[in-house]
Image: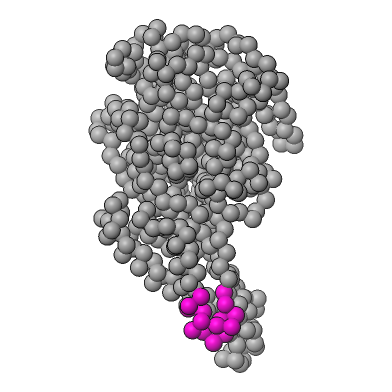
């Protein structure tokens, strides 16, 4: 970053602008120690958008020649972008192991001259907030990283609007390695696709955010408004990482989240809840099994009752504005099950973990009650469970459904960038999964657009992301940033 330093007193708590909790704090991480360094923020030159050639006035739209230069610069850097993505995919960042990957994101942000804010998530800071999902696991190594760009003279009269570029660093467990065609954390490119756990969901998105801004900087431009690149944890199980960014004070006029969406815009998504059911039994020797109560078999009967509830909830789609024409929007999934201690003993215990989807027309509290009532009534009809009812624990996702609203202005800008790159109109879609966009929209009033590259087999074996789609989404993202935030000379 070029430009003069502005006067700044690190000891002055009043010298913090809204939306960034500690712009004067850079936290550098090594494997064994975290060092806090206080430094004055660097800023760009005082040039404003009015002095930027290549931008039209009234309305302020990018000139065709500048669009071409931006897209060409993305192309020029794309080999480097692919290498950096591969380096990030090599770092296993499943839950509780994200810190080394966050170290890499912090280094990338620092290399780009951004103010780096890295902090440890604290449950006590979040548990009272709307959108929080309960989690009993340790947060001792849960770190968020944000790279903040602040222009020298941001001004709404110059058309610059602030932006959050959000992405998650955590990936889901890879499962048995012998069921992959190649080791999941050894990225490989074949036939235009990069393979590896997290390549699509969503490390490609994190890195394309970085390189979209690098393309602008290489051409001598910086955004004329605040831009926050967020790399968060726990998107795959709670969303508490994104919530921690809101708690930290980050706000903007819009957010862009490049989850793998195949170049379409997510306008509605289901809610998601996780819960665990614990079932007890009466253990006896297997030779008199009929005298006992088999906890595993009891659990299966409860699962069958929950499957009936899944059918009932899917019938509600007929009255749902966004999912009425979806063939099966609500999905119940038994993701984990364990039980018993010995093959020749009637099992005394069984637990199963389930994920359920919730339509926008439903209410989480009412849905939780319906599930608990169903399990209680099903148990009441069992001779043993009637006196030893199962317990239900709600832990992990308690994610509300989300419908994108008040996004007309930002959608117009993204649609224009998309059309410039793809030659087609931007399409909308609904999602039967969840993403962190809900936090910005539901709890901060920020329109959050999910728009990213094409990926296959996320959460499965041989996850892959299409490199050509990454290239094009990076181009569209760079054009979107230039138009939405405006540009000033670097």
Compared with 230, 47 (above or below) is above
Whole-percent x, y for residue 376 in the image: 51, 75
Compared with 375, 193 (above or below) is above
Q: What span is colored magenta in the figure?
A: 376-390
Q: Main secondary structure of the magenta part?
A: loop
Residue occupying the far right of the picture: 32
Location of residue 392 by image quarter: bottom right
**Residue 131 magenta-drawn?**
no
One can see residue 212 in this view: yes
* Residue shown at the point (50%, 69%) measured from the top left: 372
Compared with 74, 286 (above or below) is below
Residue occupying the far front of the picture: 14
* Residue shown at the point (59%, 83%) measured from the top left: 387
How many marks on residues? 0
Whole-percent x, y for residue 102 in the image: 60, 36
Whole-percent x, y for residue 419 in the image: 27, 29
**Residue 389 magenta-drawn?**
yes
């Amino acid at each position: 970053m070029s430009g003069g330093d502005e006067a700044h007193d690190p000891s002055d708590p009043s010298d913090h602008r809204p939306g960034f909790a500690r712009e004067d704090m850079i936290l550098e991480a090594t494997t064994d120690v975290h060092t806090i360094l206080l430094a004055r923020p660097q800023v760009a030159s005082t040039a404003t958008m009015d002095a930027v050639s290549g931008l039209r006035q009234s309305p302020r739209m990018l000139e065709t020649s500048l669009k071409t230069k931006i897209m060409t610069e993305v192309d020029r850097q794309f080999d480097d972008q692919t290498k950096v993505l591969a380096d990030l995919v090599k770092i296993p960042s499943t839950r509780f192991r994200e810190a080394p990957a966050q170290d890499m994101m912090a280094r990338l942000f620092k290399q780009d001259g951004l103010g780096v804010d890295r902090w440890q998530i604290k449950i006590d800071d979040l548990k009272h907030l709307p959108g929080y999902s309960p989690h009993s696991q340790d947060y001792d190594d849960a770190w968020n990283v944000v790279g903040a760009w602040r222009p020298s003279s941001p001004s709404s009269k110059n058309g610059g609007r602030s932006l959050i570029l959000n992405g998650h660093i955590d990936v889901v467990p890879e499962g048995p390695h012998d069921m992959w065609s190649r080791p999941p954390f050894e990225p490989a490119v074949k036939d235009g696709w990069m393979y590896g756990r997290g390549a699509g969901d969503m490390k490609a998105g994190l890195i394309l955010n970085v390189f979209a801004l690098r393309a602008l900087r290489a051409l001598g431009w910086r955004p004329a408004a605040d831009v926050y690149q967020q790399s968060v944890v726990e998107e795959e199980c709670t969303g508490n990482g994104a919530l921690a960014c809101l708690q930290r004070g980050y706000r903007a006029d819009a957010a862009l989240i490049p989850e793998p969406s195949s170049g379409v815009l997510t306008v509605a998504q289901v809610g998601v809840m996780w819960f665990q059911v614990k079932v007890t039994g009466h253990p006896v020797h297997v030779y008199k099994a009929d005298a006992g109560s088999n906890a595993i078999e009891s659990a299966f009967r409860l699962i069958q009752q929950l499957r009936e509830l899944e059918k009932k909830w899917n019938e509600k789609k007929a009255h749902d504005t966004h999912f009425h024409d979806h063939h099966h929007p609500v999905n119940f999934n038994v993701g984990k099950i364990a039980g018993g201690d010995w093959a020749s003993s009637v099992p005394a215990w069984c637990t199963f973990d389930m994920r359920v989807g919730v339509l926008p027309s439903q209410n989480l509290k009412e849905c939780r009650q319906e599930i608990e009532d169903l399990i209680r009534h099903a148990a009441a009809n069992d001779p043993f469970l009637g006196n030893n009812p199962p317990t239900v624990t709600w832990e992990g996702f308690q994610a509300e459904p989300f419908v994108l609203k008040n996004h007309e202005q930002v959608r117009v800008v993204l649609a224009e960038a998309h059309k410039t790159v793809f030659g087609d109109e931007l399409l909308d879609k609904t999602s039967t999964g969840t993403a962190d966009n809900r936090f910005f929209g539901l709890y901060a009033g920020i329109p959050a657009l999910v728009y990213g590259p094409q990926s296959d087999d996320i959460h499965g074996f041989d996850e892959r992301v299409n490199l050509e789609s990454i290239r094009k989404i990076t181009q569209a993202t760079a054009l979107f940033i230039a138009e939405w935030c405006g540009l000033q000379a670097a």
